[in-house]
Amino acid sequence: FSGLLTPMMPWVGGFAVSSLFEARLVHSCLPFPGEMHLTSPGIREEEITALATLCSHINFNSLGQLERLGSKIPDAAQMGLRINHGVSSIPDDRYNPCRDASKLGVPIADLKHFALKHPKEIKWLKGLHFHTHFLEADAKPLERALRSLETELGSLLENLEWIKRGGG
């Protein structure tokens, strides 16, 4: 596996993983894996300390994960949250990461409500991960998504250090 990852190192700043197994694999193959972002709907509580040691960024998939596991992460890993910004440019919901009831992130309204009730936990967040669409000809859908985040989340964005635009 290192024969595949090692030649990529000059062209990438890191890797995305979705499990402890993948994080260990990348870490074992590379002397310096760069940033390692974990995003997974199935983070196990008993694995969170090991994941935080291996990964530079842990993106929670739900507010429940953030509440349950956020306090267990040492300062080594930055916490993020996958959100659904709700701005879609796709007419076919089968391919729409922003549709209602999408599993690809917490709806902005839910995040705003959570932030009001849990100001301590919201300060743990250093980044947001969100999806747009992968077949766009220009950056207009991304621009609309970013404007939506700014409009809807406003001051909640002050604590953020990064945005990960995945899946598109």
Image: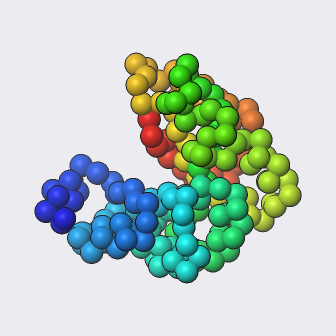
Q: Quadrant of residue 48?
A: bottom right
Residue at image position (82%, 49%) is: 113
Between 107 and 30, which is closer to the camera in this rendering? 107
Q: Is residue 143 visible?
A: no
x, y percentage for residue 149?
67, 36
x, y percentage for residue 127?
58, 53
Residue at image position (20%, 53%) is: 8
Q: Residue placed farthest to the front in the image?
A: 94
145 to the left or right of 168: right
Q: Quadrant of residue 14?
A: bottom left
The image shows a total of numbered marks equal to 0
Between 76 and 80, which is closer to the camera in this rendering? 80
104 to the left or right of 107: left
Residue 127 vs 49, above or below: the answer is above
109 to the left or right of 18: right
Between 31 and 103, which is closer to the camera in this rendering? 103
Residue 40 vs 163, above or below: the answer is below
Between 64 and 16, which is closer to the camera in this rendering? 64
Residue at image position (65%, 64%) is: 65
What colour scheme governs how the chains and residues are painted in the rendered image of this protein? rainbow
Quadrant of the image containing the N terminus: bottom left
Quadrant of the image containing the C terminus: top left
Q: Is residue 121 visible?
A: yes
